[in-house]
Structures are given as C-alpha cells and as structure tokens.
Image: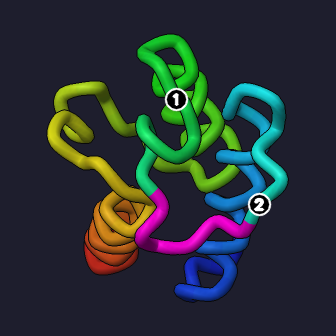
Amino acid sequence: MIEPSPHNVMTTLTAIIRKVSPGGHKAAITEATRLTQDLGLDSVASLELLSMIDEELGLFLEMEDVVGIETVGGIFALTMRRLQTLELSA
C-alpha cells in the first residue's frame, strides 16, 4: 500500500483511471474530469476501478459507496476520507 498523502493518492488514482478508461485516456486528468462524460467509464470499467483501488491502495469500496460521484475529484475525496478513517482506527 502506498503512503496515503494527497499527492500519492491522486497520482495512483490517475494511473488506475488511465488503465480502466476506454482507450487509456491520454489527456490530462484533473479533479474536475467527469468519469462518464469525459473518460467514458461504464459500469464494467467502474467495477474495475473499484477493484484496482482495493488492490493498489488497500481500500475496499462498493458500488453503493460511489453512486452519485461524477468526477475524479469525488473519487479522490472519498478515497482520502476512507484512508484517513483507516489510519485513525489503526
């Protein structure tokens, strides 16, 4: 698992998103980048994204956790909150 600094988490999420997005999305990915409209993530890619977050960051998220999240920034914020919660409970 990586050190959960905001920079490391965003770098890891960006790399994961590039892997799961159709065509490997080459353009810049920012917190404002929309998961469906800009990146083309469908339900299968979204499940793959959650699986890779678990694998890379050691953070299990379910589809219910991310329903309604539309941007990379939303995923980043959720991931940071959950990682901080894990740190506090450890």
Q: Residues within 10 Å of mark 2 (few under 14, many from 20)?
A: few
The residue under label 2 is 27
Badge 1 local density, few (<14 within 10 Å), some, or many (20+)?
A: some
Point out the residue furthest to the top here. 44
- Residue 77 lies left or right of residue 72; in this view the side is left
Q: Are marks 1 and 2 in contact (CB under 8 Å)?
A: no
Q: Residue at x 42, y 15 (%)?
A: 43
Image quarter in which the N terminus is found: bottom right
The x, y position of residue 50, in whole percent, is: 49, 33
* Residue 81 spot, x, y in % from top left: 28, 71
Q: Quadrant of residue 28?
A: bottom right
Residue at image x 31%, y 62%? Answer: 74
Quarter that holds the C terminus: bottom left
Residue 58 in the image: state x and y as whole percent: 57, 49
The amino acid marked with disc number 2 is Ala
At label 1, the amino acid type is Leu
Q: Residue at x 79, y 38 (%)?
A: 19
The disc, 1 or 2, on the residue closer to the chain's N-terminal end is 2
Q: Which residue is found at the position 77% from the left and 55% from the top?
A: 15
On residue 41, the disc is: 1
26 left or right of 89? Answer: right
Secondary structure at badge 1 equals loop
- Alpha carbon separation for disc pair 1 and 2: 15 Å
What are the residue bounds of the magenta stretch? Answer: 28-33
Magenta stretch prevailing secondary structure: loop
Task: Decide whether residue 32 is among the magenta residues.
Answer: yes
- SS at mark 2 in the image: loop
Task: State the image quarter where residue 71 is shown.
Answer: bottom left
Total marks placed = 2
Give residue 31's position: percent from left, percent from top.
Answer: 46, 73
